[in-house]
Amino acid sequence: MIKFLTPFEKISRSQRTIIALSWTVLLILIWFIGTSGQKHLFPSPAQVFEGFSGLYAEGLVVHIFQSLALCFMSIALAIVIALLFAYSWPIPLLKPVAEFVTKFRFLPFTGLSFYITLVIHEARNMQIWIMVIFLTTFLTTSLIAVIKDIPEEEFDHAKTLKCTRWEVLWQVIVLGRIDYVIDVIRQNLAITWMMLVTVESIVVASGGLGFLIKNSDKFMNHGRIIALQIIILLIGLLLDWGINFLRKAVFRYSKI
């Protein structure tokens, strides 16, 4: 037991599994005990399970796929736009544009959606472009940070190989940092999935998990809200694991 409380102590995988299971069991016990009385702030397990069954009957699977489609379309467009800004950052004429884009991450989310609704009127397109603009600013910021962290020795090495400036850009920044780009996408996908529900609750016309949460909140159905939170968390963890697995499978050297 002392070993588990010692800082920087190395433990085996089986021991890590035991610790994780112990915390999980403790959390479940606290949940059951804390909601066993007549009055409790948190919904009981029975209410949450009832929320799961009610959501499934109302087409939960369809709403999940709608949210996933919105997530993937938004992140795909944002990646293309952010990569263009990031890879143009080393070019002196375009560098101020890329840096200006990064400053938009301080804009309030509500104000951004207001101006988009003035231009776009279809609900699904409105959701997509709110997410794209929001994500592009964070992706561009993260990608530029990756470029700034490239050691100067890598650029010098490319120059000694008689590479032109454009070849240096291609070999060192574009090809040399693809695994970093995937990791940046993985990190920002968590932001995407988190903000997705907010966007869907603002523009509820096209459904999704945000629509279900908005509906559940309207009728004060806390069991359904917690059930939805669990679903969103599990899907988010699955997406994160999938992208991380892909990065390590394709770029084996990134595990070193």
Image (cartoon, rainbow, N blue to C red):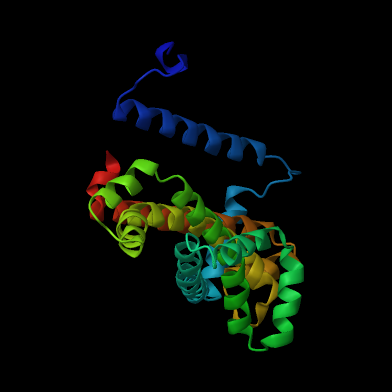
Q: Residue at x 57, y 64 (%)?
A: 98
**Which residue is located at x 42 percent, y 54 percent?**
240
Q: Left of 199 or right of it: where is 86?
A: left
Q: Nearer the viewer, residue 99 or 168?
A: 168
Q: Nearer the viewer, residue 27 or 34?
A: 27
Q: Is 209 above or below relative to 162?
A: below
Q: Quadrant of residue 149?
A: top left
Expressed as whole percent of the image width and height from the top left, the position of residue 34 reads 66, 37
Q: In x, y percent, where is residue 24?
A: 48, 36
Q: Position of residue 43 (x, y in %)?
A: 66, 50
Determine whether, in the image, residue 169 is placed left or right of residue 87.
Answer: left
Residue 102's spot in the image, x, y percent?
Answer: 61, 60
Point 70% across, 73% down: residue: 202
Quadrant housing residue 110: bottom right
Using the image as rendered, state which of residue 253 and residue 43 is in the foreground: 253
Instruction: Note whether 5 is above or below 136 in the view shown.
Output: above
In this rendering, the answer to whether 154 lies above or below 54 is above
